[in-house]
């Protein structure tokens, strides 16, 4: 019997070979953050308007933050959003 194992390269290796790893990774992180914020808003019963007010920003800016496909969000905006829902933004280089 042959031992079953991994065949071929990893998905990360594939993305790197295609030259799209950084873009795909950034988009995935943004989608996760947007989902987490949406979930926290629902858990706290917060509307978009209420969260925008807590963040001291516009509703349009919040919509951009919650849009998983919009990657033009600043670190300052992410930090304010985290604080507005009682969380801390944690980032690290790996």
Image (cartoon, helix red, strand yellow):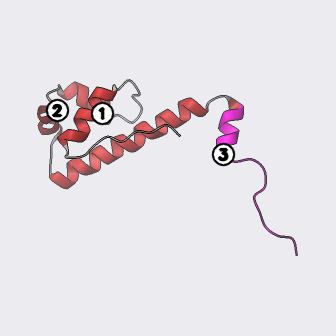
Sequence-wise first label, 3 or 1: 3
Circle 1 SS class: helix
Quickly name the residue at label 3: 11
Depth check: 75 or 57 in front?
Answer: 75
Quarter containing the N terminus: bottom right
Depth check: 52 or 90 in front?
Answer: 90
Left or right side of 44 for 78: right
| C-alpha gap between disc 3 and disc 1 | 28 Å
Which residue does the image show at 82% across and 70% down from the upper left? 3
**Percent x, y of residue 91:** 40, 39
Q: Residue furthest front?
A: 93
Which residue does the image show at 67% across and 34% down from the upper left? 16
Circle 3 SS class: helix
Circle 2 SS class: helix
**Percent x, y of residue 26:** 49, 33
**Percent x, y of residue 66:** 31, 36
Quickly name the residue at label 2: 55
Would residue 55 be counted in the magenta stretch?
no
The reply to whether dot 3 and dot 1 touch (C-beta < 8 Å) is no
Up the image or down, 39 lies above or below 50; here it is: below
| C-alpha gap between disc 1 and disc 2 | 10 Å
Quickly name the residue at label 1: 78
Which residue does the image show at 40% across and 44% down from the upper left? 32
The segment highlighted magenta reads 1-17
């Amino acid at each position: 019997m042959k031992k079953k194992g991994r065949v071929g390269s990893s998905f990360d290796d594939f993305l790197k070979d295609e030259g799209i790893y950084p873009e795909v990774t950034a988009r995935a992180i943004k989608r996760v953050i947007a989902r987490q914020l949406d979930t926290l808003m629902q858990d706290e019963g917060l509307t978009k308007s209420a969260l925008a007010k807590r963040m001291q920003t516009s509703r349009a800016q919040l919509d951009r933050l919650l849009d998983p496909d919009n990657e033009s969000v600043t670190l300052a905006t992410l930090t304010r959003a985290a604080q507005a829902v009682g969380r801390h933004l944690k980032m690290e280089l790996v």
